[in-house]
Image (cartoon, grey):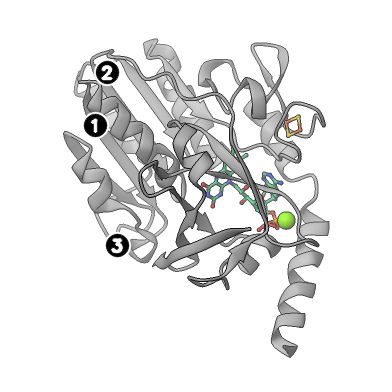
């Protein structure tokens, strides 16, 4: 059992959990994730390790409520326990000194890009961060991102905070201003990572994305997370989750992410109905 020590609501439907997991905290590196199961009847879901504190023996998870399991996790409070957490899983991000790194986070993707922006900054890179949200009330981790960035830009789709537009609009502005960019890390919804990769491709700017494909075992055995990169089948859980964005077949990823939409809709509906009764 893994005890939740702290729980905080960061924005509407986005919660932060600090969980006691000393063995995972000792080994976790930026870019890695865990697979958790809330209880015996729960399904397995992958969540990125947003922060790890080996001294305190804790990991921090930032989770957006999108369906049955994440809604259920949203009801967990400090003192509650998560039945299983396995990890760290996946390949750690390659953190090198390259010069100027643009770290892009879309929505809850900001929590996933945060440890990487921090690690790139600690390696001596100049870090420009761009974080984007639907609206002001969904903005998360702005101060944390500011601390690890040399420049920080916030965008909102509706213009209620920061620049009106998408993260890719801000990136386009920087590229067109002639800023020298050595590496882009883009993490967020698949469509956002596709748009960013399409934008940087003609300029030859290396672009790394973190693929959020459906995962079950997380150890390369079940094949659920298969993606196509450079025309080859790869397993996001063990070969990734980070890949060269210019090589990823995003259309296939988007199609596969929607494979169980109907079952997921029914599961959430049933769960919310039962919760209403409880
Ligand atoms: P459902 O209604 O079951 O699903 C909603 C959508 O989530 C689906 O349409 C599908 O696209 C996706 N999804 C469903 N099941 C899975 C699954 N087993 N694996 C992956 N995607 C699934 N979310 C966060 O909020 N914070 C994170 O830090 C985070 N890190 C991730 C790291 C990785 C490596 C991956 C692959 C995904 C990550 N996600 C993260 C996404 C998170 O796993 C899904 O939002 C979650 O599984 C949805 O479960 P659900 O039952 O609440 O929703
Ligand atoms: Fe099963 Fe990757 S999740 S092979
Ligand atoms: Mg689910």
Q: Quadrant of ligand 3?
A: bottom right
Specify the quadrant that holds the N terminus.
bottom right
Question: What's the distance in space between the residues labelled 1 and 3, CA to CA?
Answer: 22 Å
Question: What's the distance in space between the residues labelled 3 and 2, CA to CA?
Answer: 28 Å
Q: Which of the 4 quarters of the picture holds residue 263? A: bottom right
Considering only order in the chain, which callout, 3 or 1, is on the residue closer to the N terminus? Answer: 1
Considering only order in the chain, which callout, 2 or 3, is on the residue closer to the N terminus? Answer: 3
Read off the residue under disc 1: 128
Rendered position, 208 above or below 164: above
Which one is in front in this view, the residue at disc 1 or the one at disc 3?
1
Q: Secondary structure at mark 2?
A: loop
Residue at screen point 73% across, 37% down: 255
Considering only order in the chain, which callout, 1 or 2, is on the residue closer to the N terminus? Answer: 1
Label 2 close to label 1 by CB (< 8 Å)? yes
Q: Which sits in the foreground, 202 or 111?
A: 111
Read off the residue under disc 3: 160
Label 1 close to label 3 by CB (< 8 Å)? no
Question: What's the distance in space between the residues labelled 2 and 1, CA to CA?
Answer: 9 Å
Rendered position, 182 above or below 157: above
Read off the residue under disc 2: 181
Q: Position of residue 91 (x, y in %)?
A: 55, 24
Q: Position of residue 12 (x, y in %)?
A: 45, 68
């Amino acid at each position: 059992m893994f005890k939740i020590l702290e729980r905080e609501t960061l924005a509407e439907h986005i919660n932060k959990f600090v969980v006691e997991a000393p063995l995972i905290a000792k080994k976790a590196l930026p870019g890695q994730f865990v697979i958790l199961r809330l209880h015996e009847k729960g399904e397995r879901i992958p969540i990125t390790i947003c922060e790890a504190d080996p001294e305190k023996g804790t990991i921090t998870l930032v989770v957006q409520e999108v369906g049955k399991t994440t809604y259920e996790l949203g009801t967990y409070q400090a003192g509650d326990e998560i039945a299983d957490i396995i990890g760290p899983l996946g390949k750690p991000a390659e953190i090198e000194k390259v010069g100027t790194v643009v770290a892009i986070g879309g929505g809850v993707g900001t929590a996933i890009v945060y440890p990487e922006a921090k690690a790139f900054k600690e390696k001596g890179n100049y870090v420009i961060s761009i974080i984007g949200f639907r609206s002001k009330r969904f903005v998360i981790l702005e101060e944390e991102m500011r601390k690890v960035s040399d420049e920080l830009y916030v965008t909102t789709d509706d213009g209620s905070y920061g620049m009106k537009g998408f993260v890719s609009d801000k990136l386009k502005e920087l590229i067109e201003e002639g800023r020298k960019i050595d590496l882009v890390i883009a993490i967020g919804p698949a469509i956002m990572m596709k748009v960013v990769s399409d934008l940087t491709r003609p300029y030859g700017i290396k672009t790394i994305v973190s693929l959020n494909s459906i995962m079950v075992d997380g150890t390369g055995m079940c094949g659920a997370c298969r993606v196509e990169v450079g025309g080859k089948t790869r397993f996001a859980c063990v070969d990734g989750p980070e890949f060269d964005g210019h090589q990823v077949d995003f259309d296939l990823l988007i199609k596969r992410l929607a494979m169980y939409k109907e079952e997921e809709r029914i599961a959430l509906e049933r769960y919310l109905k039962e919760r209403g009764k409880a």
